[in-house]
Amino acid sequence: MPVTDKYNREFKTLRVSLLSKCNLSCVYCTMGEDEVKENNALQHSVSANTLLQQIQQLHSALQLETVRLTGGEPLLYHELVPLVEGLKQTGIPKIKLTTNGFLLERLAMPLKEAGMQSVNVSLDAIDEDAFFLMSKRNGVQKILHGIDAAIAAGLPVKINAVIMKGINENQIIPLLGFAFERNISIRFLEIMAMGFLHHNADKYLFTQEEILNTISAKYSFKKISRSAASTANYWQTADGNTFGIIANESEPFCHDCNRLRLDSDGNIYGCLSSNHPIALNSSDSQAALISKLQQAMNQKQAVKFTGSDLSMLHIGG
């Protein structure tokens, strides 16, 4: 019997946080340089073999349709290519990645050859100054080159851009132009009430309506029907380009969410809003595993994302 709740939700997508380490210091994820340096010094990543065992354990119970590798920053994971090769052997149909793209230029082709099927790149600004305001790093061109390398390698690419009021809303149109020139999709994200922003996210919320109003100054567009379990609403411009908005605050999508999360410590979570990890154990019987998965399912929100004190650095985007 599948693991479900009273809303008939199932777990079909597994998001795997490979490590709590990142080479950027984005202002919606960390509080600054010191936190990142301290975290990086303490980080010890789990082996690819251990991760594959955990993922296979979950797949045997859930018949997963998608595995998405996240971080921290997954391109820093030292066994990423062998992990993707191993995932390809599990029979899980879709293997995807979410990355900041900083190291993607040299890894795009090896990942494609290993079995990676698509890549989401987090890119919050095109302008170097705006990029620094968001990431506390220089070098946005490295990410842009990484996106082009992924396209050249034959990987479908989607851009994710977190929009924060007063910081980078002026990057919406430039980001659209960059994506449309390459015929790739882009999604704008409302700020999420996670980590140190749990009780302070409203200050930076640039809503779906405000994003649409900004885009309408240059483009005409129409809404596209939302796919089941999609995190985003999508629109198509008169020229046939598409963009999406992940409006977790304005238009929550909890009602049909099918995601399960696995962190780098071997804990599962049914929802980003939960601070209560559920530890997997390789010796778990099938009945014990199903019981833990049901606990994770019970963490899901009925209507609206509420956020938590967990940092996205630790649980994955």
Image: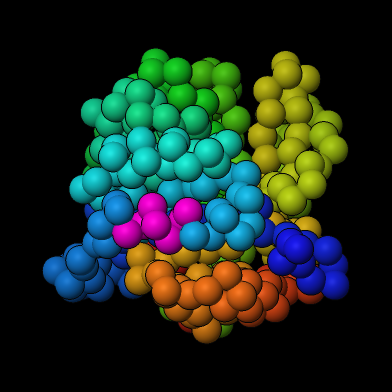
**In the image shown, does 264 or 198 lie closer to the viewer?**
264
Whether residue 55 is in magenta: the answer is yes
Above-or-below relation of 191 to 211: below
Q: Which residues are magenta?
A: 50-56
Residue found at the far left of this picture: 41
| Left/right of residue 201 with respect to residue 245 in the rendered view | left
Which quarter of the rendered picture does the N terminus lie within? bottom right
Image coordinates for residue 241, horizontal then vertical, percent: 68, 23
Above-or-below relation of 146 to 92: above
Image coordinates for residue 176, horizontal then vertical, percent: 57, 31
Above-or-below relation of 224 to 315: above
Residue 266's image quarter? bottom left
| Left/right of residue 105 with respect to residue 210 in the rendered view | left
Residue at 82% of width from left, 34% of height from top?
A: 224
**In the image shown, does 309 or 289 lie closer to the viewer?**
289
| Left/right of residue 139 with respect to residue 197 in the rendered view | left
| Left/right of residue 314 with respect to residue 118 in the rendered view | left
Residue at 24% of width from left, 46% of height from top?
A: 79
Residue at 62% of width from left, 44% of height from top?
A: 65
Is residue 106 visible in this depiction of the protein?
yes
